[in-house]
């Protein structure tokens, strides 16, 4: 991570964590969560945005007409960065990270039902120069996907978690998609500005956005490198679990605050679990106590996330600077 990330003080971290609770919250609401003044919050948050350290985006949620694939990619030596750049430009890629381990990149890919997987994997991803091998697993069910991990920065307050997303394929029309497209570029954009861009009234934009949010058709996310909030470890575990215990293990993992994402997969590893923790000592405790204490876990492997390039289909603002630095070196 860059040196800038080490410069965030406790107040900056509380402001960012508050934005993860609600990326569209007013400066007044964020000031209350961060326990400081509105003026201080507005000034510091704008500085963080200007530095490219955080980004707020409104992200459309998948419908029943799509499926997710988790793809692990092995690259030729020295090609990992160029391959990552090429994959990051693909709009169907929801998550992308450069990792340690037997594979170099992990990508989560959205696939319309009925689409030819051969075209996606063989003619698409595997045709990118530098990719030597891939393993693709169908995701069967997502048990958890949220930012609960960062709320420890704000203390032990009671912050409600989002409801499960159940958006139907036909819940959004063309205007809804245009509104969400505008807010994907800047999730904090004023409804009045979006309305002016689209030639509709502010009340229409507000009403449609809030309805989409209520129906689970959009999620407002705040992208921030975990290191900026003082979290040293981002780990992806691949777990082999006895079939009879799969759901129970997934639900127990989902209840852990440090777990950001849990999904069941059709493959040799039946669960993928992303964990974000403050220190490597916490990773040791999670491995030897949490995982070791789960009845049904038969084996596991893990990857350390070195650089996250996309989350929620959105490019992380800090990865561009780091990739530029890698090219320059």
Image: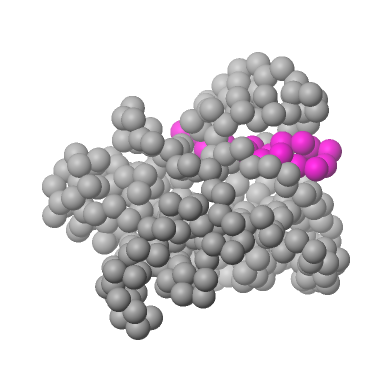
At 35% from the left and 35% from the top, the residue drawn is: 159
* Tally of marks: 0
Q: Quadrant of the C terminus?
A: bottom right
Q: 134 and 233: which one is in front?
A: 134
Instruction: Give the quarter of the image for residue 141.
Output: top right
Vertical order, 82 against 221 (above or below): below
Instruction: Please indicate whether residue 33 sits to the left or right of residue 70 in the image.
Output: left
Q: 306 and 224: which one is in front?
A: 224
Vertical order, 83 against 272 (above or below): below
At 80% from the left and 53% from the top, the residue drawn is: 136
Residue, far front? 170
Residue 15 falls inside the magenta stretch: no
Q: Position of residue 140 (x, y in %)?
A: 73, 44
At 27% from the left and 56% from the top, the residue drawn is: 45
Q: Position of residue 106 (x, y in %)?
A: 69, 53
Q: Position of residue 7 (x, y in %)?
A: 32, 49
The magenta segment is 262-279
Residue 278 falls inside the magenta stretch: yes
Q: Is residue 104 visible?
A: no
Instruction: Give the quarter of the image for residue 86.
Output: bottom right
Vertical order, 251 against 230 (above or below): above
Vertical order, 319 against 30 (above or below): below
Main secondary-structure element of the magenta-colored stretch: strand
Colour mode of the rendering: one colour
Instruction: Give the quarter of the image for residue 323.
Output: bottom right
Q: Is residue 160 visible?
A: yes
């Amino acid at each position: 991570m860059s040196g800038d990330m080490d410069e965030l003080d406790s107040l900056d971290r509380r402001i960012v964590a508050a934005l993860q609770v609600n990326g569209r919250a007013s400066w007044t609401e964020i000031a209350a969560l961060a326990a400081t003044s509105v003026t201080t919050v507005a000034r510091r948050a704008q500085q963080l945005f200007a530095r490219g350290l955080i980004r707020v985006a409104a992200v459309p949620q998948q419908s029943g007409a799509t499926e997710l694939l988790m793809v692990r990619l092995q690259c030729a030596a020295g090609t990992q960065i160029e391959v990552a750049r090429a994959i990051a430009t693909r709009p169907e890629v929801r998550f992308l990270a450069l990792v340690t381990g037997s594979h170099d990149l992990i990508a989560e890919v959205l696939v319309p039902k009925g689409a030819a997987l051969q075209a996606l994997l063989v003619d698409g991803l595997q045709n990118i120069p530098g990719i030597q091998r891939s393993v693709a697993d169908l995701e069967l069910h997502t048990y958890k996907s949220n930012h609960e991990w960062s709320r420890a920065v704000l203390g032990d307050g009671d912050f409600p978690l989002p409801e499960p997303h159940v958006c139907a394929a036909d819940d959004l029309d063309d205007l809804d998609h245009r509104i969400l497209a505008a807010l994907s570029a800047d999730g904090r954009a004023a409804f009045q500005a979006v309305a002016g861009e689209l030639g509709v009234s502010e009340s229409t934009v507000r009403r449609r956005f809030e309805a989409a949010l209520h129906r689970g058709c959009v999620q407002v996310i705040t992208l921030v490198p975990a290191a900026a909030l003082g979290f040293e470890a981002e780990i992806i575990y691949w777990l082999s679990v006895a079939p009879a215990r799969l759901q129970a293990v997934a639900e127990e993992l989902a209840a852990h605050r440090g777990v950001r994402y849990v999904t069941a997969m059709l493959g040799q590893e039946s669960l993928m679990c992303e964990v974000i923790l403050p220190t490597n000592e916490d990773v040791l405790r999670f491995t030897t106590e949490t995982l070791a204490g789960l009845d049904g876990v038969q084996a596991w492997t893990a990857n350390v996330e070195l650089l996250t390039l996309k989350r929620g289909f959105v490019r992380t603002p800090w990865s561009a600077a780091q990739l530029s630095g890698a090219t320059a070196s």
